[in-house]
């Protein structure tokens, strides 16, 4: 699990989330409020008809987009694959965001914080 995923405030707009998704490595935008995960957005949620100033929280959901840290990895992975999802937020019982489970594009393992930092450095972005 990546323990320091990029997050957005609850007040983020659809336009801000669209800009975040310009990075091809991004699969999920996480909306947080004081460390609590309030919603997750995937590219497909961003209908072209949505105005950029629309509050992103209106299209965010947690349904099928979060798991607890004690969930069986095999069951979580199966659910991710059935849904065609490569990212799932990991939260505590009180919805505190703990990290992001990121399935590698090969489908053969999960990204680590080290993987993410290395990719950011290779792309010329600060780690």
Image (cartoon, rainbow, N blue to C red):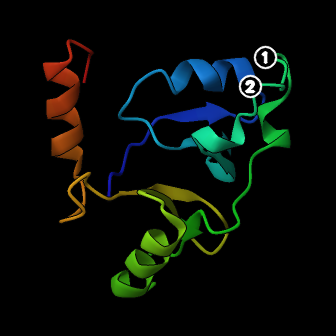
- Residue 88: % across, % down: 49, 60
Which of the image's four quarters has the N terminus?
Answer: bottom left
Residue with the most extreme top position: 124
Q: Identify which residue is drawn at 24% across, 38% down.
A: 116
Please determine whether, in this image, residue 44 is positioned above or below residue 64. Answer: above
Q: Mark 2 and mark 1 in contact? Answer it, CB < 8 Å.
A: yes
Which of the image's four quarters has the C terminus?
Answer: top left
Of residues 16 and 127, which is closer to you in this image? 16
- Residue 53: % across, % down: 84, 16
Q: Identify which residue is drawn at 57% across, 66% down.
A: 66
Of residues 88 and 8, which is closer to you in this image? 88
- Can you tell which mark lies on residue 52? 1
Residue denoted by label 2: 14
Q: Identify which residue is drawn at 20% across, 17% down.
A: 123
Cα distance in 3D space between marks 2 and 1: 5 Å
Comes first in the chain, label 2 or label 1: 2
């Amino acid at each position: 699990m990546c323990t320091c995923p990029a997050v957005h405030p609850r007040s983020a707009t659809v336009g801000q989330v669209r800009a975040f998704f310009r990075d091809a490595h991004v699969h999920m935008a996480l909306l947080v409020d004081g460390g609590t995960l309030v919603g997750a957005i995937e590219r497909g949620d961003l209908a072209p008809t949505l105005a950029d100033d629309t509050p992103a929280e209106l299209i965010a959901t947690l349904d099928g987009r979060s798991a607890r840290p004690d969930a069986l990895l095999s069951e979580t992975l199966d659910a991710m694959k059935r849904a065609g999802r490569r990212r799932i937020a990991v939260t505590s019982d009180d919805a505190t965001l703990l990290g992001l489970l990121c399935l590698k594009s090969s489908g053969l393992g999960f990204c680590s914080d080290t993987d993410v930092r290395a990719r950011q450095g290779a792309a010329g972005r600060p780690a």
